[in-house]
Image: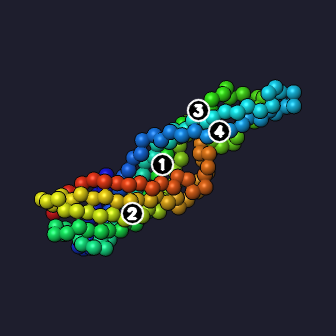
């Protein structure tokens, strides 16, 4: 969902809220024995992860071609802002969690957790007037991490999550 406040015909402010349902992926790991007498000395396992993201962003939108109310031709715009992405993570291992006998990787930990990151957001998009102040829009948007608060629930914390989205929708102009 996006809300726009048009300051001039070429410039305006926006507020953006996006939700990404749980993405699923897995990684392979090895649990190593704590003692030389433990058999087996290593166990291969997979970590199955589910990550759901919510994103709130505030920023500026500038029309490079056209204007917010142009109805004769297509429009091209650029948007930039700052946001906050919050994530929910669920990690599940394929083996029993035997911490008395085995060392497990420090990241990601087994279970459910949350994380937050500040983001710099940028988008490039187009709009095509359909009629009656309704526009078809498409855009490519990037959420670039601007902060790093390590989370034990993420396998990789550096620049994570760096998200790219392709969005398509309708914009309705209210005067």
Is 5 placed left or right of 78 in the picture? Answer: left
Q: Residue at x 50, y 39 (%)?
A: 24
Foreground tag (3 vs 4): 4
User: Where 30 sits versus 135, above or below?
Assistant: above
Quadrant in the picture for residue 124: bottom left
Looking at the rendered image, the disc whose residue lies closer to the viewer, 1 or 2, is 2
Q: Dots 1 and 2: beta carbons under 8 Å? A: no
Label 4 – label 1 distance at C-alpha: 25 Å
Q: Report which quarter residue 166 is drawn in.
A: bottom left
Q: Residues within 10 Å of mark 3 (few under 14, many from 20)?
A: some
Which of the two marks, 2 or 4, is nearer to us in this view?
4
Instruction: Give the label, 3 or 1, closer to the camera.
Output: 3
Q: Nearer the viewer, residue 21 or 130?
A: 130
Mark 1 / mark 2, whichever is N-terminal? 1
Question: Where is 21 relative to 172, above or below?
Answer: above
Q: Which mark is residue 104?
A: none
Which residue is identified by label 2?
123
- SS state under label 1: strand
Query: How many angstroms separate mark 3 from mark 2 (CA)?
Result: 35 Å
Q: Residues within 10 Å of mark 2 (few under 14, many from 20)?
A: some
Residue 32 image-quadrant placement? top right
Q: Earlier in the sequence, mark 3 or mark 4?
A: 4
SS type, badge 3: strand
Residue 150 location (% of width, % of height): 61, 51
Q: Earlier in the sequence, mark 4 or mark 1?
A: 4
- Label of residue 28 in the image: 4
Q: Nearer the viewer, residue 14 or 45?
A: 45
Between marks 4 and 1 in the image, the one whose residue lies nearer the viewer: 4
Residue holding disc 3: 92
Q: Which mark is residue 86?
A: 1
Please tell me which of labels 3 and 2 falls first in the chain: 3
Left or right: 14 as drawn, with respect to 89: left
């Amino acid at each position: 969902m996006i809300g726009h406040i048009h300051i001039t015909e070429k410039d305006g402010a926006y507020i953006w809220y996006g939700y990404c349902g749980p993405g699923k992926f897995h990684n392979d790991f090895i649990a190593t024995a704590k003692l030389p007498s433990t058999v087996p000395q290593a166990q291969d396992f997979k970590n199955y992860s589910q990550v759901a993201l919510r994103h709130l962003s505030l920023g500026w939108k500038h029309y490079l071609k056209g204007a917010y109310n142009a109805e004769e031709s297509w429009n091209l715009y650029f948007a930039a802002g700052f946001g906050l992405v919050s994530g929910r993570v669920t990690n599940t291992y394929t083996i029993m969690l035997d911490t008395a006998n085995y060392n497990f990787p420090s990241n990601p930990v087994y279970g459910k957790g949350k994380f937050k990151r500040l983001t710099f957001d940028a988008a490039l998009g187009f709009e095509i007037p359909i009629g009656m102040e309704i526009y078809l829009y498409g855009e490519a948007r990037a959420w670039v991490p601007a902060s790093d608060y390590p989370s034990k629930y993420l396998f990789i914390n550096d620049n994570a999550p760096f998200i790219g989205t392709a969005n398509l929708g309708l914009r309705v102009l209210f005067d």
